[in-house]
Amino acid sequence: MPETEGRPETANDKTGHECRVLAVVNQKGGVGKTTTTVNLATAMAAVGKRVLIVDADPQGNASTGFGIARAERGAGCYELIFDGMRIEDIAVPTMIPNLSLVTSSADLAGAEIQLVNTENREFRMQQAFARSAHDYDLILIDCPPSLNLITLNALVAAHGLLVPLQVEFYALEGMTSLLQTVDAVRERFNPTLAIEGVILTMYDKRNSLSVAVERDVRAYFGDRVFTTVIPRNVRVSEAPSHGKPVLLYDLKCPGSQAYLQLASEMLRRENGQANAIITTAKAVGE
């Protein structure tokens, strides 16, 4: 496939249905990337958005977060990229109405090496989305914690990026490589790729370092940083071990409420639907 001169073909192009594709990415692990993917998707689905998570991380934590054991996973992201399968053939429903998942599997661990010599290697995920039926309003791609060829596929396929950023001393240092990669992808493959938003995670308002890092991040990224911050919260950490999003595990905990507020802020930015997610949030826990 030649390098594109306009916006690459994505999940909207064949049907005209407005499906937003966002890659959740950070080259550093342990920053809340998968937690954000799982719980933001849950919050969006709670208000009737049709949501798909693509678990593109070989660790498969998003799949585990919905209680899907490795032994129970069939065809997933690997088959989507390499075997010409369509999303509707492999997406599995979760316990959340309106929310489906393309699982990760052990085969995905070898995909990085396999992609090196694969034709059109940067476009495999984009092509998979283009050949699929598009019954979703939002697709969230949970990327690996590194800037590899799988992550590059997600960046080429996405309309925008969500960047969870842990509030710590080195928070901004790791962003340099990501921003350079985004610029390169925009120049060569996906000219409309943009950072949709930066999400501050593991925030402790009692810690002066959190406040200082937040100030620096907001000064650097401006209004691309979401107003909502995700606090450190033990219930958020416990939820994956129970195979549930924290919104199901404990709806009233500070972490759940923060993710509801984050989803509300995203909707407000997009189309003024901010109040919908708050007024219907109780449906998630029922």
Image: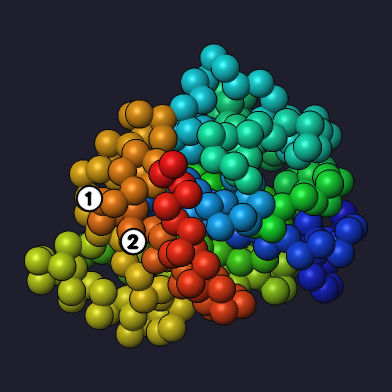
Q: Quadrant location of the C terminus?
A: top left
Q: How much space separates mark 2 and mark 1, taking CA atoms?
A: 10 Å
- Label 1 SS: loop
Residue 258 badge? 2
Residue type at mark 1 is: Asn
Q: Quadrant location of the N terminus?
A: bottom right
Residue 233 badge? 1
Position in image of residue 120 (x %, y %): 80, 48
Q: Of marks 2 and 1, which one's residue comes earlier in the chain?
A: 1
Residue type at mark 2 is: Ala
Residue 68: tell me if it is visible.
Answer: yes
Residue 152 appears left or right of 210: right
Residue 271 badge? none
Dots 2, 1 in contact, CB < 8 A: yes
Position in image of residue 73 (x %, y %): 60, 21
Indicate the colouring scheme: rainbow
Position in image of residue 160 (x %, y %): 61, 66
Residue at position x 63%, y 34% in the image: 93
Residue at position x 26%, y 51% in the image: 253
